[in-house]
Image (tube, rainbow, N blue to C red):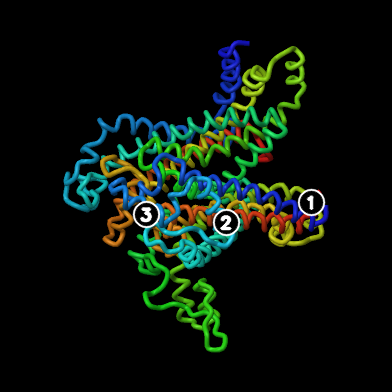
Amino acid sequence: MSEEESYGRIFVQLLPRVSGLRKRGLAGWAILAGSTIVSLLAIMTITAPWLSPHNPIAINVGPLLSPPSNQFPLGTNHLGQDMLSRVISGGAIMFQVSIISVIVCLLVGVPIGLFASFKGGFTDKTTSLVMDSIYAFPGLVLAIAIAAMLGPGVVNMALSIAVVYVPSYFRIIRSQVLTIKELSYVDASRMLGANTKTILVDYIFPNVVPSIVAVATINFADAILTAAGLTFVGLGLSVSTPDWGWDLTYGRQLLASGAWWVIAFPGLMVVLLALGFTLLGEGLSELFNPRLEK
Amino acid sequence: MSLKSYVIARILLTIPMIMLLLTFVFLIIRVLPGDPASLHFEKNVDPATLLAFKKQLGLDKPLLMQYFDYLIGLTHGDFGKSMQDYSPVSQQIFSAFPATLELAIGATLIMVLLGVFSGAVAARHYDTMRDHSIRVFGIVSYAIPVFFLGEVLIMVFGIYLRWFPAGGRMYPGVSPLGLEIGGKHYPTGLFVLDSILEGSFYKLSLSIRYLILPVLALGLVLCGIFIRLTRSNMLETLQLDFVTAAKARGLRERTVVYGYALRNAFLPILTMMGLQFAALLAGAVLTETTFSWPGLGRYLVDRISFRDYTAIQGVVVFFGLIVAAVSLVVDILYAYLDPRIRL
């Protein structure tokens, strides 16, 4: 079977599940709601240069710390920046960091998970030990240590987040491969002369894809929250980039002045984006492995 | 396997995990691009000063020697010297830790009590409006960054309503003295406990007032997983025969649900508490920063702004050790309570 054919088959298997979403109760609704939120925010971020009424990083666009008004619907911050423009443009960093970190996790976690758990024995034991040690560690603290060493930047932030979340991919893949590799179709293909690579890529991998998709989606939410957390402890980007995390960080110092609008709107956007991915991820994992819900 | 041999096996398994972790942290600080000493000065330093600085901290030795120094130091509680003032990091860690511990204990109470209670209510009222709203709350709470929730709580309860202080841990100058033995005070560093031991109601009420908002922020954000766990566990249990039997004997539904079925969910909840401990500490770092709570997390964040890499390494290692110890204790407790685990 060629690669395209096998992926085509996965797509065909997924399609009827997706088209019948509405009939799937809570999981279906979660997927619909999650994907709607995420797509709307993605569209908003892409079209931000045209949507935002002001330059999001220009200072003194309006008076300092003005509450929401007709001219500045979401108010201005302590630098006189327009909060509406910052809210519209601030998602770009979140999307970039989370996309890069999820890609890195996929590129590192999936092959290691497939190979180590298929090999079994010593390879599996040592890899599991390493992954479990990282998994047990407070994620944000580890990400802070790595980000502190790598310095600021979108890619560095994404890398430090990826290190923390690779074990989640490894664990889910491992648990599945351990079951799948005992199935008779794997034995059959081995007897027909398929080598390890063929068995892993063509026969086992397609069965693991749904779980990977579900983990990756939830991982988007984690990456967004971790990125916001890294920014909050001072490891984020500079003022010259519109970023919800930055607004939340510096808004903390403005709380005493009663300027709720500086934190409220960027904060809600982070929640909305993380919520969108969480709903999508929860719905997908429910759909792919229905448990005792009914 | 007897409990004793299980405990020994579990401890033996913890050792390689801790070694890996220590090595990993060591490598992050030393091997990632940019050496910590020159990063500390943001590269604006003459070579002589840099060398003296490295010597003072033992960073001039070969990597392998540094590694052994680091491991040997840790065995007697030496977490290295601060890059800022060359003082031992361990002292600062130990003095900041009680504040973090107090926050963690409080947040655990909120997350477990609230999570388990709402989960049980949701299961009892399965597929009703109440069940749906509790589940939605669980998912939404997961998506809220703890520092945003903290900021909202400060805004509403600290600044507008003025019910609770907006940050800090105590009035300046006031500190609970703890237990008095023979004219000497022995504070534990946990302000609520110290106030009780001292017998001061005034200090107790103050410490609780300062504690409430941070604990609420952290507890609320983490309670979602307990809602889900309790709910799905209870839904399973409620279908078991002993529940039907209890109902048939005429016990009130409330007694059956909260008295009988909920007890069955206890073990998974205990395990989850162990697993969530790492998330709790990570959340504490952000919560402490939000509320200016003088614990380990705030210390870590302060050190980041000073580019004090030895202190950062110390705190990270300490966090790792605590998590390893807690998960060891939880596993042993679990094996004690449920002998099947030892098989």
Q: In the rendered structure, which disc, 2 or 1, sits on the residue that comes first in sequence?
A: 2
Identify the secondary structure beneath mark 1. helix
Give the residue type at disc 3.
Phe
Q: Quadrant of residue B4?
A: bottom right
Q: Residue furthest top?
A: A2
Would you name the residue on which mark 1 appears?
B342
Pointer 3 indicates a residue of which chain? B
Q: Position of residue A39 (x, y in %)?
A: 41, 31
**Label 2 neighbourhood size at 10 Å, few (<14), some (14-19), many (20+)?**
few
Give the residue type at disc 1.
Arg
Pointer 2 indicates a residue of which chain? B
What residue is at 47 percent from the left and 76 percent from the top?
B205
Residue B53: assigned label = 3
Would you name the residue on which mark 2 appears?
B72
Give the residue type at disc 2.
Ile
In this view, the residue in front, B183 or A99, is B183
**Label 1 neighbourhood size at 10 Å, few (<14), some (14-19), many (20+)?**
some
Pointer 1 indicates a residue of which chain? B
Q: Are marks 1 and 3 in contact (CB under 8 Å)?
A: no
